[in-house]
Amino acid sequence: MAASEESAVYSKTSWAEPNRRGNQNEGTLTTRQWPSWWTWELELTAHLLKRMEDRGFNEVDLRRMLEHASGHTPDIMAGRFVIEARHVGQSWGVVVEPDEGRQLLVVVTAYPVDRAQS
């Protein structure tokens, strides 16, 4: 699949797979706790790429946040979800929107969560 100017498609490994010793990684949720879209390939939006630059994190950091995510809740926008994650010792929210038609998990944005909101 070709990447557009507005977004790029990246493959990812399944986050629900056990580590090399056959144990679940601590902080990693199992497939049963996540919707089917959790294992889809990622699409990173242009908006997200700009926020990554502004907020000082990269794709590896994002994937690590998602790999060790602790949960998800519906976003205020219908069809989107906020993934609860951590990065450099702080709580983060990663907004995703499953694209059923293309079976891609579109990552809209990621932001540090203010401690007063936690």
Image (cartoon, helix red, strand yellow):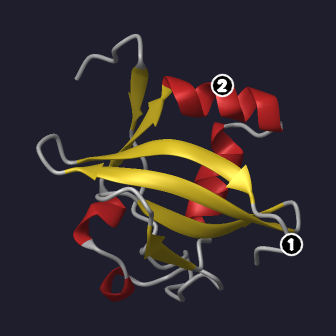
Assess disc 2: are there few (<14), some (14-19) or many (≥20) residues with their C-alpha within 10 Å of its C-alpha: few
Q: Is residue 21 above or below residue 64?
A: below
What percent of the width, then of the height, locates residue 98?
29, 53
Q: Quadrant of residue 28?
A: bottom right
**Which residue is nearer to you in this view: 93 or 44?**
93
Reading the image, the residue beneath label 1 is 115
Circle 1 — which element?
A: loop
What distance separates the C-alpha of mark 1 from that of mark 2? Answer: 23 Å
What percent of the width, then of the height, locates residue 9?
37, 30
What percent of the width, then of the height, locates residue 33?
37, 86
Residue 113 left/right relative to 63: right
Circle 1: residue type = Arg
**Quarter the C terminus occupies:** bottom right
Circle 2: residue type = Lys
Residue drawn at 88 percent across, 68 percent down: 89
- Going from N to C along the chain, the mark reached first, 1 or 2, is 2
**Quarter the N terminus occupies:** top left
**Which residue is nearer to you in this view: 68 or 107?**
107
Residue drawn at 51 percent across, 54 percent down: 95
Circle 2 — which element?
A: helix
* Badge number at residue 50: 2
Tell me if label 1 and label 2 are in contact, CB under 8 Å: no
Residue 10 left/right relative to 23: left
Assess disc 1: are there few (<14), some (14-19) or many (≥20) residues with their C-alpha within 10 Å of its C-alpha: few
Q: Quadrant of residue 5?
A: top left
* Badge number at residue 34: none
| Callout count | 2
Q: Is residue 26 above or below residue 97?
A: below
